Amino acid sequence: MNIFINMNTFVTVVDALSFSEAARRLGATKSQVSQRIQQLEKHLGCTLVSRTRPISVTDAGQLYYSQAVHLLQELKNSEQSVRRANAFLQGRLCISAPLAFTPRYLAPIFSKFAKKHPDLDIDVQSTDSFVSLQDQHFDMAIRLGRLEDSSLVARIITDNHHLICASPEYLERNGTPQHPEDLQLHDGLMYYNREPNGFWRLPFNGRQESFRIRTRLHTDSGHQLLESAKAGIGLAILPTFLAEDALLCGELIPVLQPYSPSGGHLSVVYRKTIKTPDKILALAKFLGDEVGHPAPWDRRLLERGLFY
């Protein structure tokens, strides 16, 4: 005997006040419904319904009915909770991620998240170009830098610190700048997405000011900036997550630290909806937990006194 099937059958019989109607609602035969009620009455040791036309419910049946309705609703709620817990990590999750940040840091996190949730299909597309979430192709994006005001929801994961860096070879050959005005005497490695016009925007006297630097190289690749700085081509503004290894081993040296430009944040953004899909919220939380604050790359630089 399945107690929950028989309990549900009894509740349906009481609601319908008819064995025939209860059988129709349950997709069963009248004899099956009658047999289930008999099994339940035998199990409880009392009569629950009288077989009159229409049927009537005994006092014991009324008491059992009220408790059965409550138990069946609790069972239904539990099943729905489990289904929701599984369902929000099913289907496809398409993510736009910054190219420079993905290989070392995001790729292992995405892989760990995918392994934890095997029913979730993850589509990661890495690019340093701005991707609009309004075309509905992407569910969410991970962005570095300052966020423009928009209709998107943003969740900050950690700070995205930047340092002005150069190789020891370059500084020995050209000297170390002591003030932003000195930059006009130096070669600069320029990032298209941030410095399209040959000026660096740096904090000075409590506000952002522009300082000219000789353009030695232009690129849209953070890794190209890193390699060119290590090769002694010029000064570069680099995110700490990208420059960490070169700074720790002495291939790069930070300069003008009081004037280091803000890199904004590492953030997760997604469209504003009535109910955000749980798979988006789950990945955003997972990223926050994995990266932490301060981020591990900043923490290692802080411990070595290379960043403040």
Image: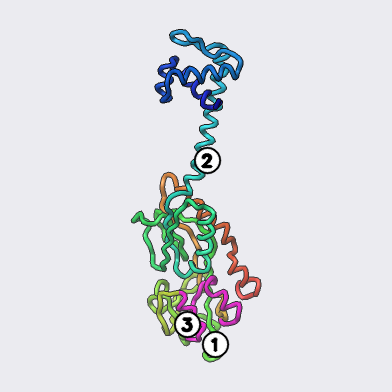
Mark number for residue 11? none
Residue 228 is inside the magenta segment: yes
Pointer 1: what residue? Answer: 171
Question: What is the secondary structure assignment of the residue under circle 1?
Answer: helix
Between 55 and 43, which is closer to the camera in this rendering?
A: 43
CA neighbours of label 3 inside 10 A, class few (<14), some (14 to 19), many (20+): some
Pointer 3: what residue? Answer: 228
In the image, is 123 to the left or to the right of 170? left
CA neighbours of label 2 inside 10 A, class few (<14), some (14 to 19), many (20+): few
Q: Which residues are magenta?
A: 222-251
Pointer 2: what residue? Answer: 82
In the image, is 305 to the left or to the right of 179? right
Distance of mark 2 from mark 3, alpha carbons? 53 Å
Q: Nearer the viewer, mark 1 or mark 3?
A: 3
Q: Is residue 71 above or below residue 99?
A: above
Q: Is residue 45 above or below residue 201?
A: above
Distance of mark 1 from mark 3, alpha carbons? 14 Å
Q: Nearer the viewer, mark 2 or mark 1?
A: 2
The answer to whether the residue labelled 1 contacts the one labelled 3, judged by CB atoms less than 8 Å apart, is no
Can you give x and y, in whole percent of width and height, for residue 167 in the image? 54, 84
CA neighbours of label 1 inside 10 A, class few (<14), some (14 to 19), many (20+): some
Residue type at numbered disc 2: Val
* Image quadrant in which the N terminus is located: top right
Which picture quadrant has residue 305? bottom right
Can you give x and y, in whole percent of width and height, for residue 188 in the image? 45, 82
* Image quadrant in which the C terminus is located: bottom right
Q: Nearer the viewer, mark 2 or mark 3?
A: 2
Residue type at numbered disc 1: Leu
In percent of the image, x 54 and y 35: which residue is there? 78
Mark toward the start of the polypeptide (1 vs 3) = 1
Residue 113 is inside the magenta segment: no
